[in-house]
Amino acid sequence: MTSTELSYDQLVFSGGGLRCFWHGGFMEVVEADHRLRPKRVTGSSGGALSAAVWIAGREIALRDRFEKALTTEEANFSLDDADDDAGRSAHQRVYASIVEDVLDDSATARIADGPAFQISLSTPGNCDAPTLRALVGGTIYQVEQFLAPTPRPRLASLTGMEQRLIDGRQAARDGTLHDLVRMAATVPPAFRPDDWNGEPVYDGGMVDKAPMPDPDEGRTLVLLTKRFKVLPDDDGGRIVFVQPSDDVLPGRKLDFTDPTLPQSAWDQGRDDGRHWRNKIT
């Protein structure tokens, strides 16, 4: 079968922890019949890793590597992790190892030569008590997501949290892509924060779960990993939001003890990909 090209200039991968494996299943099905060649790609939180492996063609490798890693984890938190230099939880320790393994030299080279790629981070800036400000911002974000979930959180910014869109291609060329992808998913207090360009940085999803590229031009496909009752404005149809047909891994998006979860999210993405593919054909 001859594949046809989908005319999207931009592709956005939202965050969502292990729900982000929905991206892989969705794209596997859609790309079996259609080509996507966006000029710009962005990702937030776990979606930064989804975006990176999509550009590099390493989606299945990521899923398999995650499944292998989760077979060895017995708990999502232990006192040993709290004192471990690798992080405050299994999530940070395991995630960092997986990112380094999957985004190998070959994958990094493809990203460096690929489409424009931006990764979203959030930061309280250079202020007093940045971790406290991030914790307050994260708490407010969680409350907002519980009461009025939206891909575009509004309230965390009231605490001084700001977005930073970082050039992923340049990070790949500079040898810092692993750090950037890991930092994009730094959730306080489970993850120890890091600095990027002298600023403390955290999970970009606190400010924007599905960040638009800069510049923001042309038709855009936004892949969400969670259902929302109300979606942001689609700018007269320029922006196409695709969301799962049902909840993905409800209550378990950060459960690193069950190796079946990545495949479960992947399979749901495949089902939703078939539905969307048939809808647009």
Image (cartoon, rainbow, N blue to C red):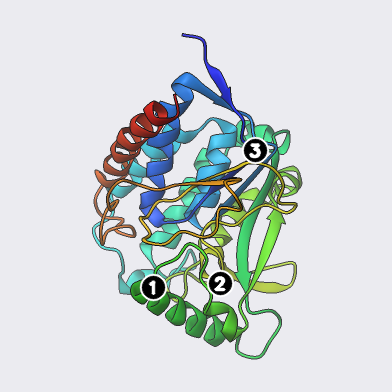
Q: Where residue 134 sits in the image (x, y, percent)?
A: 54, 80
The residue under label 1 is which amino acid type? Ala
Name the residue beneath numbered marker 2.
193
Q: Residue at x 61, y 53 (%)?
A: 235
Q: Residue at x 30, y 34 (%)?
A: 271
Name the residue beneath numbered marker 3.
108
Q: Is residue 197 left or right of residue 232?
A: right
SS for tag 2?
A: loop
Name the residue beneath numbered marker 1.
148
SS for tag 1?
A: loop
Instruction: State the residue in front, 211 or 188.
Output: 211
Q: Is residue 65 left or right of residue 255?
A: right
Q: Where residue 150 sits in the image (x, y, percent)?
A: 45, 65
- Counting other residues with Cα less than 10 Å from the Cα at mark 1, is it few (<14), some (14-19), or many (20 or more)? few
Whether tag 2 and tag 1 are in contact, CB under 8 A, the answer is: no
- Which quarter of the image is occupied by the C terminus? top left
Q: Is residue 237 above or below residue 76?
A: above
